[in-house]
């Protein structure tokens, strides 16, 4: 496989203007996603993972958010692309699945109308052709009785069915990139595993690359081949999933992995207490001096407060933003 | 007292129960208003019985809509059951169609001992009250203390929950989610209750904060000898936290027992599916194989017989017709299934 990346985000900055204040939500994020790969983006609420994805799709309000840096899809710069050209890419080359399908599907249009619209706009299909393809797509995402689903309004479907319909709509034009922003967070575990299995299946069949955003390390482990961990607007660690889970280097990643409740951890004398990260997530307009994780970090010393550490390669593409990573490992 | 080395649980629950719920059912009416819509009944909880021994943590687990939160509210008498009774210690506190309901003046002193922490700390704190009044309100209502003495109790409880004492005069919006949940816990504990219902207390919190709050609940249980009903959809959390577990599906309790036994040898096919659907958390597991197809049926029109038969991989004819009773399969490990796993 050629090494050229499908999606190349470099030095992305997103700043929100709230009144007179300027709030940095994303600060210098660089990510790359190869064709057909799955990149997991993990972090807590407010860490900038969703803002990053919205910036890629150019879905941020121009009046309040300023986006700087570069986002290249198939070697084409997306930042600054005129609205019309961006619209031609959205839905056909790149598309997105959101957390809560009810807020993303139009409640006054049938599922069929919404998917057919995508097909008619991007693929110049006739009404008839769009209808046929829509029903085939709904069948493909595992919806029973796709003809009936196409004629249904979103509120008639269950949460899992709506998410399947969203996926059908996102993938009907066979995009090269799918951004899935917490696609299973609103679903129950048994339905979550169905939707994840569906995404895996479609991904390998269509060869779509996925930027998979989640706060759930368990889900990321199942889905992604590479992972980037974000904290307070920056990537703090990045690497292949296997390497990062086996050998986490950043104290934040280590803390997150250690504080997980796992199904297989009883039996040992682990007890009921979990190792936990102290303190609270800093708000983006009140970031501490130096390393943002410093105040919550058990390894923090004077050097950490002097400046934000650089993201450095600790070997084989395992990047970490911590000056003490090697000492504490 | 004889010591059983096999039960190396952190808490060996004493046999005495604090809460006893028997045959609890709750239907909510939907429609049937003056607009003449058809009246329908949503069966949220049907025939749920369990006991919570003194000092234990009972975990109630299930998917959304299975009736676990309704069960929590029924036990506290926050909503009235359609059928069934609840005992707190030896007091009958909840009784369906009671000819003579428990009068307020007898219920109020008991209420003090039964508190609840809700899922969303952003919705469960009054934004117009400062933290001091929020936490001390119950203390004043129950006349345990008044004025500055009530505030002292509030400050003490907040400190116990890991909050600085300068928070008394501040307002909820000044705090993060994790801190707000600590305030909610302090509000519940200021009355020195015996029993606490924690309804998804960490589901709305950030991942790095969840462990803090769980550890706090564990510490408080040990310090104050609390008994918990812990409601969660997260099997990993329940496994860590609870000594006893009840698995609910579509309003019915399908399996109960000690947490260790249920996780080691699940007897109900639904429990096994839930356990294998949860992400293992380790990379390199290959393709995901969903253990169950379909979704939970509507509670307006639950299936006849066993509620799970529409999704059960091993359902037979009898499952479609006869509802299985919750029966003891040994050592207090109960299951409601005609063909429990391992029995074939």
Image: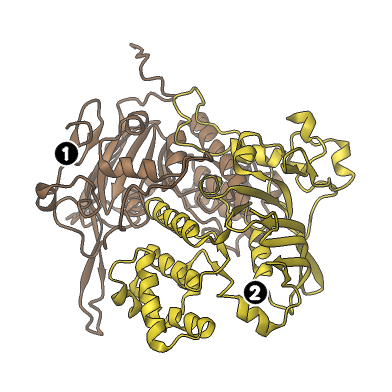
In this rendering, do the residues under marks 2 and 1 share a single chain?
no
The colour assigned to chain B within the rendered structure: brown
10 Å crowding of disc 2: few (<14), some (14-19), many (20+): few
The colour assigned to chain A within the rendered structure: yellow
Where residue A205 appears, as percent x and y from the top left, is: 46, 59
SS assignment at label 2: loop
Where residue A243 appears, as percent x and y from the top left, is: 64, 38
The answer to whether residue B73 is left or right of residue A16 is left
Where residue B126 appears, as percent x and y from the top left, is: 56, 62
Give whichever of A266, A36 is nearer the camera. Answer: A36
Count of labels in the image: 2
The answer to whether residue B137 is left or right of residue A140 is right
Q: Which mark is residue B339?
A: 1
Against A85, residue A261 (above or below) is above
Q: Which mark is residue A313?
A: none
Residue, disc 2: A59
């Amino acid at each position: 496989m050629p090494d050229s990346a499908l999606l190349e985000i470099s030095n992305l900055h997103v700043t929100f203007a709230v009144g007179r204040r300027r709030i940095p939500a994303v600060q210098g994020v660089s990510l790359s996603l190869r064709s057909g790969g799955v990149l997991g983006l993990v972090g807590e609420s407010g860490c900038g993972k969703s803002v990053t994805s919205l910036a890629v799709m150019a879905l941020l309000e121009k009046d309040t958010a300023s986006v700087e840096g570069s986002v290249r899809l198939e070697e084409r710069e997306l930042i600054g692309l005129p609205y019309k050209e961006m619209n031609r890419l959205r839905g056909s080359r790149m598309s997105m699945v959101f957390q809560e399908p009810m807020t993303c599907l139009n409640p006054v249009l049938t599922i069929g109308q919404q998917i057919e619209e995508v097909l008619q706009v991007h693929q110049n299909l006739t009404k008839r052709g769009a209808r046929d393809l829509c029903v085939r797509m709904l069948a493909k995402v595992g919806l029973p009785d796709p003809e009936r689903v196409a004629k249904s309004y979103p509120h008639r479907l269950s949460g899992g069915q709506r998410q399947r319909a969203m996926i059908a709509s996102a993938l009907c034009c066979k995009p090269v990139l799918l951004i899935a922003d917490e696609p299973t967070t609103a679903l129950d575990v048994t339905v979550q595993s169905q939707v994840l299995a569906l995404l895996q299946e479609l991904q390998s069949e269509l060869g779509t690359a996925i930027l998979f955003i989640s706060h759930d390390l368990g889900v990321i482990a199942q889905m992604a081949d590479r992972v980037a961990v974000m904290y307070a607007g920056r990537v703090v660690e990045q690497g292949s999933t296997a390497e990062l889970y086996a050998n986490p280097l950043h104290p934040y990643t280590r803390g997150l992995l250690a504080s997980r409740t796992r199904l297989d951890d009883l039996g040992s004398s682990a007890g009921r207490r979990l190792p936990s990260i102290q303190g609270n997530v800093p708000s983006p307009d009140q970031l501490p001096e130096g390393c943002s994780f410093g105040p919550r970090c058990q390894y923090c010393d004077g050097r950490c407060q002097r400046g934000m550490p650089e993201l450095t390669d600790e070997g084989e593409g395992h990047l970490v933003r911590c000056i003490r990573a090697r000492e504490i490992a | 007292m004889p010591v059983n080395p096999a039960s190396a649980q952190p808490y060996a629950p004493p046999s005495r129960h604090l809460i006893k719920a028997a045959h609890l059912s709750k239907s909510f009416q939907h429609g049937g208003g003056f607009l003449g819509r058809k009246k329908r009944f949503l069966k949220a909880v049907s025939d749920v019985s369990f006991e919570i021994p003194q000092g234990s943590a009972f975990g109630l687990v299930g998917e959304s809509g299975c009736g676990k939160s309704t069960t929590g509210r029924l036990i506290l008498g926050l909503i009235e059951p359609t059928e069934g009774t609840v005992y707190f210690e030896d007091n009958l506190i909840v009784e369906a169609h009671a000819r003579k309901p428990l009068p307020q003046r007898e219920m109020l002193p008991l209420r003090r001992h039964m508190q609840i922490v809700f899922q969303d700390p952003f919705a469960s704190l009054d934004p117009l009250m400062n933290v001091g009044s929020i936490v001390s309100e119950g203390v004043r209502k129950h006349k345990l203390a008044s004025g500055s003495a009530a505030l002292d109790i509030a400050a003490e409880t907040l400190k116990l929950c890991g909050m600085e004492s300068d928070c008394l005069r501040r307002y909820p919006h000044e705090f993060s989610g994790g801190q707000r949940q600590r305030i909610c816990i302090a509000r519940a504990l200021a009355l020195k209750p015996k029993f606490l219902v924690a309804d998804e207390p960490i589901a709305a919190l950030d991942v790095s904060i969840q462990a803090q709050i769980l550890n706090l609940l564990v510490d408080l249980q040990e310090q104050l000898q609390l008994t918990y009903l812990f409601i969660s959809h997260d099997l990993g959390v329940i496994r860590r936290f609870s000594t006893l577990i009840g698995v609910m599906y579509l309003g019915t309790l399908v399996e109960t027992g000690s947490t260790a036994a249920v996780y080691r040898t699940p007897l109900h096919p639904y429990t096994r599916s839930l356990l294998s659907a949860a992400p293992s958390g380790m990379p390199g597991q290959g393709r995901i194989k969903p253990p169950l197809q379909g979704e939970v049926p509507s509670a307006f029109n639950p299936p006849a017989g066993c509620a799970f038969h529409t999704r059960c991989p091993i359902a037979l004819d009898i499952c479609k017709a006869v509802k299985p009773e919750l029966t003891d399969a040994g050592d207090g490990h109960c299951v409601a299934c005609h063909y429990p796993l391992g029995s074939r």
